[in-house]
Image (cartoon, rainbow, N blue to C red):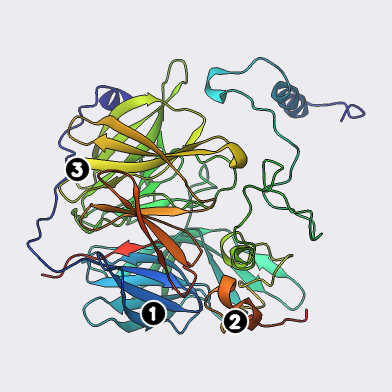
C-alpha cells in the first residue's frame, strides 16, 4: 500500500486505521492482539486436497472423522467449491445417504 | 430505556415465571437429520420413537410454535413445514421461493402470539439466465394461512447488518419484535420502525466454530420472558462486561446482573433447569489445538457462577439441557451425541444414531 498516497480525509483515515492494527498501542475495548498465522477464514479457500488447515494453521479444528467433512462442507460451513452446493444446483446430493461416515459411497456423483 | 437503569440492575419486574407441569411422562425431543427427517427421541431411554419425513429438503432449524403445540421446520429448499406435536404429522407446508426469486432468509422466522403470521428478515436472489440479481434484505411477514409473504418493509438505514445471526422474539401482545444481535433492537410491528435500542450484545465466538448457541426455545418458561447471557460495554472506559440479562417482553424492561469482565473467549447460550434455580453454559478459550472447554454452572437465585468443570468438547458442537434439567446433551453434525450428568458434569453415556444430525435438539413440552 506504500505506493498509494491518500488524497482526501477519508482515505487518510483508512490508512490510519490500517496502521493502527499493526501498532502496539491497543485501545481498552479492543482486547489484546494475538499473533496468528495468515490463514484465510477457517478451512482452505483453494481446492487443493491435502492442504486443508483450520483457522489456527493446524489440523485440530478440522472435521473428525474426515468423512464428516463432506456433510459439514455441504450444509454447515457451505463450501460450494469443494463439494456440491445445496442452495442452487444440487439440493438432492445427499438424498440417498443418511450418515456420511457410514454410507458415503451412496452419495450421488455430480458432473458440473 | 436509559443505560443507568441497567447499571443499577433494577429494572422493574423481569423475573422468570416457570410453567408448572405435573406430567409423569418422559420428555420428548426432536432433531432434524439427513436425508430429510425429524427424529422424535424419548429422553431417559434415548430411543427413537418416530421418524417424521420432511419432503422438502433437509431440515436446517427447528422451533416451537407460540402455543408450543407445533414445530416449525425450515429446510434447505426454502420451505417451512409445520409438524403437529400430538400426531407427529406434517400439517402445513409453505414454499418461500417465488419462481426465479429465491429467498435468502437472514436467520429464522418467529411466530406471532396467534401463530397466524411469522416475522423474519430476508433478501432475494433473482435467478437470471446468466447471473443472480441480489435484492436488499427486508423485514418480511409470512402469512401461514395464505402460504405466502404478504408484506415486506425496508430495514432501518443505519442497521444494514440487521438479522445476520440475530434471534427474534415477539412480545405477548404482538406489538413489538425483539431482535437480539450486536444490540437488542425493539421494533414496532405496525410500521417496523425501531422503537428502542438497548446496548447489550450477545457474547462473541472466536474463530469459525459452527456452534449453535443462543436463545433456547424453552418449553418450561412462558413466552414473555427471555433470559440469556449478554455483553455490556461500560460507557466510560469501554470495558466489556458479561452477565445475565432477563427481559420482560411485555413491560419492555430488563434486568442485567454483571458477572465479570468479558474475556477473549467464547460463551454459549444460557440454559436453565425447569425449576429456574440453576443455569448452564459452555465456555471455551484458546484456538483449536489448545482449546479448553468448560461447563459453567450458575446459581440463578444469586446470579453467580458456582462451578466450572473442563470437559472434552468436540470441534463443532451444540449443547442442550434435557427437559428435566438432569442431563446435558453434547452433539454436532455427526451421528452420535454425548450425555453428561448435569449434577456431576461427568459423561454418562454416548448414543450412536444411524443418521447425521442437521439441527438443534428441540426439547418438547411434557404432555399434559
Q: Which of disc 1 and disc 3 is earlier in sequence?
A: 1
Q: CA distance from mark 2 to mark 3?
A: 46 Å
Give the letter of the chain under mark 3: B
* Residue density around tag 3, few if under 14, some if 14–19, many if 20 or more, within 10 Å: few
- Could you say which is closer to the camera, residue B81 or residue B355? B355
Where's the N terminus of chain A, which quadrant? top right
- Could you say which is closer to the camera, residue B114 or residue B243? B243
Q: CA distance from mark 3 to mark 1?
A: 32 Å
Q: Position of residue B189 (x, y in %)?
A: 33, 56
At a point 74% along the width and 36% down the height, the residue shown is A37
Residue B251 disc label: 3
At a point 79% along the width and 57% down the height, the residue shown is A50
The residue tagged 2 is A92
**Which residue of the protein is positioned furthest toward the right in this rendering?**
A3
Q: Position of residue A26 (x, y in %)?
A: 62, 18
Residue B147 disc label: 1
* Residue density around tag 1, few if under 14, some if 14–19, many if 20 or more, within 10 Å: some
Q: Position of residue B6 (x, y in %)?
A: 28, 27
At a point 36% along the width and 81% down the height, the residue shown is B51
Q: Position of residue B233 (x, y in %)?
A: 43, 26
**Which residue of the protein is positioned furthest toward the left in this rendering?**
B22
Up-down relation of residue A18 to residue B358 (above or below): above
Q: Residue B207's quadrant in the figure? A: top right
Whether labels 2 and 3 share one chain? no
User: In the image, B217: left or right of B367?
Assistant: right
Q: Secondary structure at mark 3?
A: loop
Q: Is residue B199 visible?
A: no
Amino acid at each position: 500500500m506504500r505506493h498509494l498516497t491518500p488524497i482526501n480525509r477519508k482515505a487518510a483515515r483508512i490508512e490510519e486505521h490500517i496502521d493502527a492494527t499493526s501498532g502496539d498501542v491497543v485501545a481498552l475495548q479492543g482486547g489484546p492482539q494475538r499473533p496468528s498465522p495468515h490463514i484465510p477464514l477457517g478451512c482452505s479457500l483453494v481446492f487443493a486436497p491435502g492442504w486443508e488447515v483450520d483457522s489456527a494453521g493446524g489440523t485440530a479444528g478440522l472435521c473428525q472423522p474426515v468423512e464428516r467433512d463432506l456433510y459439514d462442507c455441504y450444509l454447515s460451513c457451505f463450501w460450494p467449491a469443494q463439494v456440491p452446493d445445496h442452495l442452487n444446483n444440487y439440493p438432492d446430493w445427499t438424498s440417498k445417504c443418511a450418515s456420511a461416515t457410514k454410507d458415503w459411497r451412496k452419495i450421488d456423483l455430480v458432473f458440473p | 430505556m436509559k443505560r443507568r437503569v441497567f447499571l443499577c440492575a433494577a429494572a422493574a419486574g423481569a423475573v422468570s415465571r416457570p410453567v408448572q407441569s405435573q406430567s409423569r411422562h418422559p420428555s420428548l425431543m426432536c432433531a432434524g437429520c439427513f436425508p430429510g427427517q425429524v427424529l422424535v427421541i424419548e429422553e431417559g431411554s434415548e430411543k427413537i420413537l418416530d421418524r417424521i419425513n420432511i419432503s422438502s429438503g433437509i431440515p436446517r432449524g427447528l422451533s416451537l410454535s407460540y402455543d408450543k403445540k407445533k414445530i416449525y421446520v425450515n429446510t434447505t429448499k426454502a420451505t417451512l413445514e409445520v409438524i403437529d406435536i400430538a400426531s407427529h404429522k406434517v400439517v402445513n407446508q409453505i414454499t418461500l421461493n417465488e419462481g426465479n426469486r429465491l429467498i435468502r432468509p437472514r436467520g429464522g422466522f418467529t411466530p406471532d402470539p396467534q401463530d397466524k403470521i411469522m416475522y423474519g428478515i430476508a433478501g432475494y436472489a433473482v435467478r437470471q439466465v446468466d447471473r443472480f440479481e441480489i435484492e436488499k434484505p427486508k423485514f418480511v411477514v409470512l402469512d401461514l394461512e395464505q402460504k405466502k409473504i404478504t408484506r415486506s418493509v425496508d430495514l432501518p438505514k443505519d442497521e444494514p447488518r440487521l438479522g445476520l445471526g440475530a434471534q427474534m422474539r415477539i412480545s405477548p401482545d404482538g406489538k413489538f419484535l425483539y431482535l437480539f444481535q450486536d444490540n437488542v433492537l425493539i421494533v414496532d410491528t405496525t410500521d417496523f420502525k425501531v422503537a428502542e435500542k438497548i446496548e447489550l450484545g450477545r457474547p462473541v465466538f472466536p474463530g469459525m466454530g459452527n456452534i449453535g448457541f443462543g436463545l433456547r426455545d424453552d418449553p418450561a418458561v412462558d413466552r414473555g420472558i427471555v433470559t440469556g447471557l449478554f455483553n455490556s460495554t461500560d460507557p466510560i472506559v469501554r470495558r466489556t462486561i458479561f452477565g445475565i440479562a432477563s427481559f420482560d417482553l411485555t413491560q419492555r424492561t430488563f434486568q442485567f446482573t454483571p458477572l465479570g469482565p468479558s474475556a477473549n473467549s467464547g460463551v454459549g447460550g444460557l440454559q436453565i433447569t425447569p425449576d429456574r434455580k440453576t443455569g448452564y453454559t459452555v465456555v471455551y478459550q484458546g484456538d483449536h489445538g489448545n482449546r479448553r472447554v468448560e461447563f459453567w454452572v450458575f446459581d440463578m437465585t444469586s446470579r453467580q457462577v458456582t462451578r466450572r468443570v473442563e470437559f472434552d468438547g468436540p470441534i463443532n458442537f451444540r449443547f442442550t439441557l434435557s427437559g428435566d434439567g438432569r442431563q446435558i446433551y453434547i452433539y454436532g453434525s455427526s451421528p452420535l451425541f454425548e450425555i453428561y450428568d448435569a449434577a456431576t458434569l461427568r459423561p454418562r453415556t454416548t448414543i450412536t444414531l444411524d443418521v447425521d444430525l442437521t439441527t438443534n435438539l428441540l426439547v418438547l413440552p411434557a404432555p399434559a
